[in-house]
Image (cartoon, helix red, strand yellow):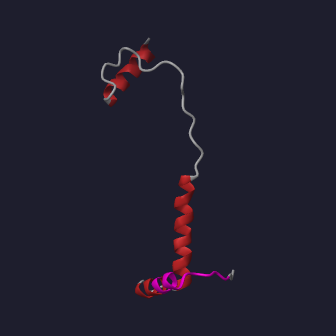
Amino acid sequence: MQTTIELNDHLLAQAQILAERERTTLNRLIEDALALHLRTSSFRHRPALPVYRGHGGLTSSVTDSLTHRALLDAADEEDQA
């Protein structure tokens, strides 16, 4: 598809130099830059995740909640009860 865009002269000159240096076309350089921007900007517009604001927490048997092993042990105790 063809379209016309207006670019700042300085920006265009820099892009042309970069395209030459990378041995690609200006068109390909602009397409790649636009695709990258669209991919990364989609992360900024993700919906907020729901947050549980209820009461509760870890069981009292979890003495060291900073270790993975303590959480697994507590889960095993709950399964056996």
Is 67 or 57 nearer to us in this picture? 57
Residue 9 in magenta stretch: yes
The x, y position of residue 44, in whole percent, is 54, 53
> Image point 64% across, 81% down: which residue?
5
> Image point 67% across, 83% down: which residue?
4
Count of numbered marks: 0
| Up/down of 50 relative to 81, above or below | below
Can you name the residue that lies furthest to the top here? 81
Residue 81 in magenta stretch: no
> Image point 34% across, 25% down: which residue?
65
Left or right placement of residue 47 versus residue 40 in this view: right
Residue 3 location, quadrant? bottom right
Q: Which residues are magenta?
A: 4-14
> Image point 56% across, 83% down: which residue?
27
Left or right placement of residue 31 versus residue 19 in this view: right
The x, y position of residue 62, in whole percent, is 35, 19
**Quadrant in which the N terminus appears:** bottom right
Left or right placement of residue 81 versus residue 63 in this view: right
**Quadrant in which the C terminus appears:** top left
Is 78 or 43 nearer to us in this picture? 43
| Up/down of 21 relative to 79, above or below | below
The x, y position of residue 20, in whole percent, is 44, 88
Residue 57 location, quadrant? top left
The x, y position of residue 80, in whole percent, is 42, 14
| Up/down of 66 relative to 18, above or below | above
